[in-house]
Image (cartoon, rainbow, N blue to C red):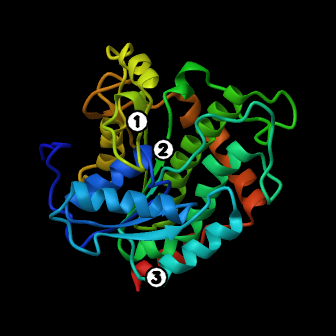
Amino acid sequence: MTWDPRSLPDLSGRVYLVTGSNAGLGYFASEQLARAGAKVLMSGRHPNRLSAARAAIRRRVPDAAADATEPLILDTSNLGSVRSAAASVRGRGGLDGVLLNAGIVHAPRARETTIDGHEVVFATNALGHFALGGELLTALAAAAGRMVWVGSMSTALTPYDPVDPQLSERYSAWRAYVQSKVATAALGFEADRRLRDAGVPVESVVAHPGYSTGGRTPGIAGVNEPSRVKRFRDNLQAAFAQSKEHGAWPLVRALADPEVEGGEFWGPRTGSRGVPRRQKPPKITRDSEIGVRMWDFAEAATGVHWPLEQAAADARA
């Protein structure tokens, strides 16, 4: 099947959850899914920002159904919020897919911790999504759905091994971001291995957006409003940068293309920009030893143990 990111196949009747959907990649992924006819559970931390994002989709996708989007308050840095949101989603029934997108890109200069006591970047980018994936596993299995973990080009540029995930020592903003993305991708590939071994009909895929910037992205009130300075600066990088609208293409393809398979890695054609292509993931993210280590750490840190046997049994019933 030829995949055209500007003209997606009909997704009517499908239900997807997108984390961090009030801005950036999450917003554009939500818009593209809604444009194709899907129902999108748009999640974020702030009700007003979610309202602005949903209003933008109504303006930009006038043919979408009145209930094409639904708000869901979810803060991936807060495990209580993750559990509450997941319970709400499970109550709806089956779920065709979840895009584990929310995250901190510009990490704080000094180390910060969450209400649960975890380093904030690792908690937001990796731990919260691990917990959400486990909490939603039975709902995904009921629909033979898919989860997509959002990786980053940075894992190939500076492949930090997250031996100290909480960065109790040697904290830096860049290290916090990169190692959280190494862990995210490693968890995504480890999830694929465990889902296959357990016979759970859920696919786990990793995708990355390339180098996507707000200054090369369409201006949308309440969603993306870059300053003139940012527009100028980001446009100087046109040779290797792209908009967040285009950066969402690999994420949406990984989520909705029926020809994508669990364990695959998707990103822009050139690595930093372009139409989505299947790619070879950075070696560190495919290291099974790191995957197992991150999985054990995430289980201990979140208290979430994925119900693999239950999900497999329910799917067979």
Looking at the picture, how far across and down is residue 111, in whole percent? 81, 37
Q: Is residue 292 above or below residue 232?
A: below
Looking at the picture, how far across and down is residue 122, in whole percent? 69, 44
- The kind of residue on which mark 1 rests is Pro
From the image, tell me which residue sits under label 3: 314
From the image, tell me which residue sits under label 1: 209
Q: CA distance from mark 2 to mark 3?
A: 28 Å
From the image, tell me which residue sits under label 2: 150
Q: Is residue 110 above or below residue 2?
A: above
Q: Residue at x 79, y 59 (%)?
A: 115
- The kind of residue on which mark 2 rests is Val
- The kind of residue on which mark 3 rests is Asp
| Mark earlier in primary sequence (2, 1) | 2
Looking at the picture, how far across and down is residue 114, in whole percent? 77, 53
Q: Residues within 10 Å of mark 3 (few under 14, many from 20)?
A: few
SS at badge 1 = loop
